[in-house]
Amino acid sequence: MILDAARKALATGPLCDPCLGRPFADRSFGLTNDQRGRALRTTVTLAEDEPFEPGEESDCWVCEGQCSRYDLWAERAAEALAEVDFSTYQVGTRAPPLIEENDALLRAEAGLPEDAGELFKSECNREVGKRLGARTGTEVDFERPDVLCMLDIQRETVEVQVNPAFLYGRYRKLERDIPQTEWPCSACGSTGKELAPDGGERNCRGCGGSGYRYDDSVEGLTAPIVREAMDGSEGVFHGAGREDVDAKMLGTGRPFVLEVKHPRVRDIDPEAIESAIEESTDLIEVEGLRRATHTMVERVKELEASKTYVLTVRFAEPVSQSNLEEVCEALLGETISQRTPNRVDHRRADIVRTREVYAIEGTLEADPAADAESNASEGTTGSLREGRRATIEVHGAGGLYVKELAHGDEGRTEPSLAGLLSVDIEIEALDVLAVEGEDEPFERSEFFLD
Ligand SMILES: [Zn+2]
Ligand SMILES: [Zn+2]
């Protein structure tokens, strides 16, 4: 049966061994199509008791000699990658339509199903890939290779696609009024220019001509340094959750990933980058930098994260420390029901959502703004018994509107600190102390390269 098909195939004209073996690629393991073809040719010759004639190479009517050029293609691919730092690769092939047609014709002539064995392009991907790996000491990766080599057989070209590299870390933002990502000025469309009354051009008054609403951003302070270290074309910042511009990010910091497009260097020293960032700015700090896989981007962007905040609040009326503690106790473990906050764009649908408060603690603070008539009074231990100012530390589920939890948002958030205390609350400052994965940590080994 298989010999019958091989005999018919051989009768179609001059064939190379790989082209003869390819329709039988789904038979047996551990053989190349070249070896399959040679074995079939030998067996048919023995069965027919005819003189042995070796396979054609350049005169093969199916591939017209392409199957004997895999070494050449591997050499070309290696040359095209000479300036690129990579440890994993994949090879793709654009096969000439004629070879695909001839492959189908050969199967029809041999009485085989149209999809018997494999296609020329699959063989070419594998054979060139094996040779490229051996030549460069790198490994094939079918999921997410560092580089992809596209062979265009007809045009005799190799196109190289360099996939991005990723660096994971946590940042602390030590000052307020720094956005997480660069914030283009909307007044001038980030051109930095506007039309003057005399019809000429002048610096945009919205941004002073910089094109950005804020001079610095966490992205702007980190991405260029990493991009330069990896010699890439662009650096893109991905933060775990958004952050208010006026909030500091303290404590253990917020996870982020920097994506560098078209990197020429992947094997960077994360500690050297940490030092470079540290030397360049006092506004932020980064730590725990590690080379990561592309899956880390999805992870930091989509993993529901719980957050710990510290708020400084001011009460409209004096509040006692014991009352504050009672109310915090009441909110502990409570599920908070929150309508879309008033501060959010009202064109957005008004929905109610619920989030849990995992932990909450309130402490009265000395009030530097208070004068002698303030109701603040000190207890025997030196801590305040009553006052108008407090810090509230809250650990809440991802998505909890923490400002609204404090001031109640005119009854839109229930229960709230202000509601339970029956006193109006104004937020003076809000900082983030920690961002953690809700059910599991961000840092899991399978998301890192080393
Ligand atoms: Zn051939
Ligand atoms: Zn502007």
Image: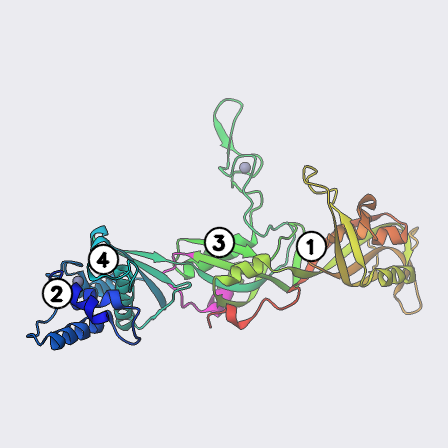
Between the residue at mark 2 and the residue at mark 1, the CA separation in whole angstroms equals 66 Å
Q: Earlier in the sequence, mark 3 or mark 2?
A: 2
Amino acid carrying mark 4 in the image: Ala
Q: Earlier in the sequence, mark 3 or mark 1?
A: 3
Residue highlighted by disc 1: 399
Q: Is the residue at mark 2 in contact range of ligand 1, meaning its CB lies under 8 Å from it?
A: yes
Residue 154, percent from left and from top: 20, 52
Residue highlighted by disc 4: 108
Magenta region includes residue 248 = no
432 in relation to 211, above or below: below
- Residue 2 placement: quadrant: bottom left
Residues under numbered marks 3 and 1 in contact, where contact means CB atoms less than 8 Å apart: no
Could you tell me which secondary element the residue under label 3 belongs to?
A: strand
Is residue 282 visible from the viewing direction of this image?
no
Give neighbour class at mark 4: few <14, some 14-19, many 20+ (Cα, 10 Å): some
Name the one closer to the observer, 182 or 368: 182
Disc nearest the viewer among 2 and 4: 4
